[in-house]
Image (cartoon, helix red, strand yellow):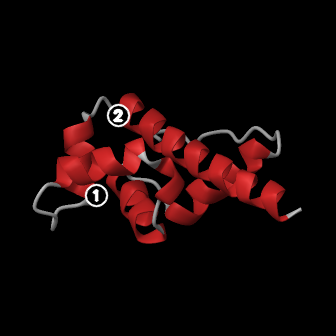
Amino acid sequence: MYQIKMDEALTFTENYLEAIEAARIKQGRSHSDIARAAFPTQLDPVGTYRKVRNSGRTLKLADAYRLAQAVHHDFASLCWQVSQAMQGYSIPTPPGH
């Protein structure tokens, strides 16, 4: 049972990062733009974002929040949408998002 829940958690993380990527593409923004918006205090925001994208298994909650803000999404709503999508539900995206 524990292994199943961990797999769900990893799937959630991957799906969350995919939602961030979809929002980035929809907004016509580059990875560098999102990186600078999400991690402005890092010495290498682009490198920080690359590490997050390439190791989706270790997404920190604070980083997930920053990424949602960077793509102009409400963190809680984005988490809910990802969770619902994992359960097979379709969520209409509000206009302008």
Q: Quadrant of residue 85?
A: top right
Question: Where in the figure is residue 64, as x and y percent of width and height?
Answer: 45, 60
Labels in figure, total: 2
Q: Which residue is painted at 52% across and 38% down in the image? A: 18
The residue that appears at 58% across and 65% down in the rendered structure is 76
In whole angstroms, how far apart are the C-alphas of marks 1 and 2?
15 Å
Residue annotated with mark 1? 38
Within-10-Å neighbours for mark 1: few <14, some 14–19, many 20+: many
Q: Is residue 82 left or right of residue 54?
A: right
Kind of residue at disc 1: Ala
Q: What's under tag 2, amino acid-wise?
A: Gln
Which percent across, then down, holds residue 21? 43, 37
Left or right of 56 on screen, residue 49: left
Identify the image quadrant of the N terminus. bottom right
Q: Position of residue 24 (x, y in %)?
A: 37, 37
**Vertical order, 25 against 5 (above or below):** above
Work out whether 53 lies above or below 29: below
Question: What numbered label is drawn on residue 27?
Answer: 2
Q: Depth check: give the residue in front, 31 or 96.
A: 31
Q: Is residue 95 above or below residue 79?
A: above
